[in-house]
Image: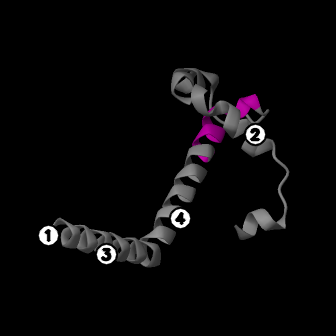
Amino acid sequence: MTEEKEKKSSWFDGVKSVLYGMAGHDMARYALKTRGSMEHLFILITMGDLLGIPILPPYYSLRLLPYVVPQISTWKRRMLREKDLTDALA
């Protein structure tokens, strides 16, 4: 009886994975990509003076600095990376 239950469970998991791949995977990837873009835009607005783009007064940037420090290295790498046509397509 446990073998039947395991087969049923594995079949159900397979169907669930296929339905997620068909319906939800693209939406989840798009949501993560949008979130990343918004985070990088927020860091640009608050810490733009690190790249020579002063947008906000330094007082607010310094207040937000403890929350942004873990992301600064990846943000700088992304902002200073050379971009080409294939980046717009992905």
N-terminal-most mark, 1 or 2:
1
Q: Residues within 10 Å of mark 3 (few under 14, many from 20)?
A: few
The colour mode here is one colour
Q: Residues within 10 Å of mark 4 (few under 14, many from 20)?
A: few
Residues at marks 1 and 3, CA–CA distance in whole angstroms = 15 Å
Residue, disc 4: 30
The disc at residue 47 is none
The residue mark sitting in front, 4 or 3, is 3
Q: Nearer the viewer, residue 48 or 1?
A: 1
Residue, disc 2: 77
Residue, disc 1: 1
Name the spot of residue 1 as percent of width and height, x first: 14, 70
Residue 41 as seen in the image, left or right of residue 26 = right
Residue numbers of the magenta segment: 41-50
- Tell me the amino acid under the disc marked 4: Tyr
The disc at residue 11 is 3
- Tell me the amino acid under the disc marked 1: Met
Task: Work out whether 15 lies above or below 85.
Answer: below
Residues at marks 4 and 3, CA–CA distance in whole angstroms = 28 Å
Image quarter (top left, top right, bottom left or bottom right) of the C terminus: bottom right
Q: Quadrant of the rendered structure where residue 5 is?
A: bottom left
